[in-house]
Amino acid sequence: MEKPVYKRVVLKISGEALAGDKGFGIDSDILNSIAEQISEVHKLGVQVAIVVGGGNIWRGRNSKHMDRATADYMGMLATVINALALQDALENKGLDTRVQTAIEMKEIAEPYIRRKAIRHLEKGRAVIFAAGTGNPFFSTDTTAALRAAEIEAEVILLAKKVDGVYDSDPALNSSAQKFESIDYIDVINKGLGVMDSTATSLCMDNSIPIIVFGISTPGNIKRVILGENIGTVVRGS
């Protein structure tokens, strides 16, 4: 029988990953593939909490002439759209799911309550954290680090369009070298863009490892959960 390496994880899915090759919006094939992969690891007994970004709908940093706080709140709403889409896809796979938002919108989701989130996980439900931290100036990467610390997750699985951490952008440099593992402080000092510095520091302070891997290959989430050496591991020395 397949034995997972982790019991409780936070899966961070970037908004761009949900867009697929379209670059904008939600690719239904990608969405269903991710839902199927989450369902597979859930069947192994793994407790899965999910943080989803909103960059496929709105990126606040691209709104140069808009108030930063306003742009960030718009981004939080974009994550809620993605969270509801993912909830629907997961429930179509038969997985009981709850969406919790950092900004109260009780008609469509629960407010984020740490103890309630943990209880949902213990009962076998997937929990999707939406609306970031509820505060402007903080990314959904920071949300993933914060929620992982709060619910005592063993690892953050950082699902991206790229298959790991490189010393430069592989889309721009064909000679970019991929790291198999790297220290938190090196990620910060070299500005490698795995997570923003706030999120990376939070993971470092709480000794939460990060595994960066490509989401486009079906089955990769399960491979990571089973301990296969794919992607890049970010941890302390």
Image: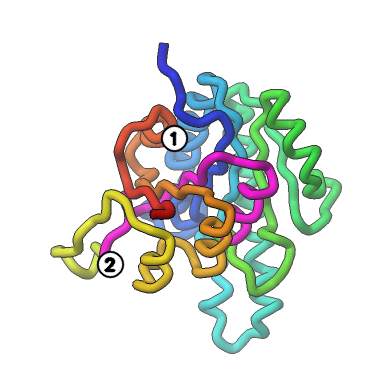
Q: Quadrant of the C terminus?
A: bottom left
- What secondary structure is found at the residue carrying circle 1? helix
Residue assigned mark 1 = 33
Q: What is the distance, in whole Å, between disc 1 and disc 2 at their CAs?
A: 26 Å
* Tag 1: amino acid: Ser
Q: Picture coordinates of residue 108 (x, y %)?
A: 79, 45
Q: Is residue 74 left or right of residue 154?
A: right
**Residue 209 or 2: which is nearer the viewer?**
209
Q: Secondary structure at mark 2?
A: loop
Span of residues in magenta: 142-168
What's the residue type where badge 2 is placed? Asp
Q: Does residue 109 show up? A: no
Q: From the top left corner, tell me how far across and down residue 134 is, in percent.
A: 74, 63
Whole-percent x, y for residue 1 in the image = 41, 11
Residue 142: x and y in percent read 59, 61
Location of mark 2 (residue): 169
Q: Farthest residue toward the top? A: 1
Against 154, is 68 above or below?
below
Few, some or many residues within 10 Å of mark 1 (<14, 14–19, 20+): some
User: Which comes sooner in the sequence, label 1 or label 2?
Assistant: 1
Residue pictured at 45% horizontal, 57% vertical: 16
Instruction: Tell me: 159 left or right of 69.
Output: left
- Between label 1 and label 2, give the one nearer the viewer: 2
**Residue in the image at 49% along x and 54% along y:** 14
| Relative depth, front residue between 182 and 82 | 182
Q: Residue at x 63, y 60 (%)?
A: 78
Residue 166 magenta-highlighted: yes
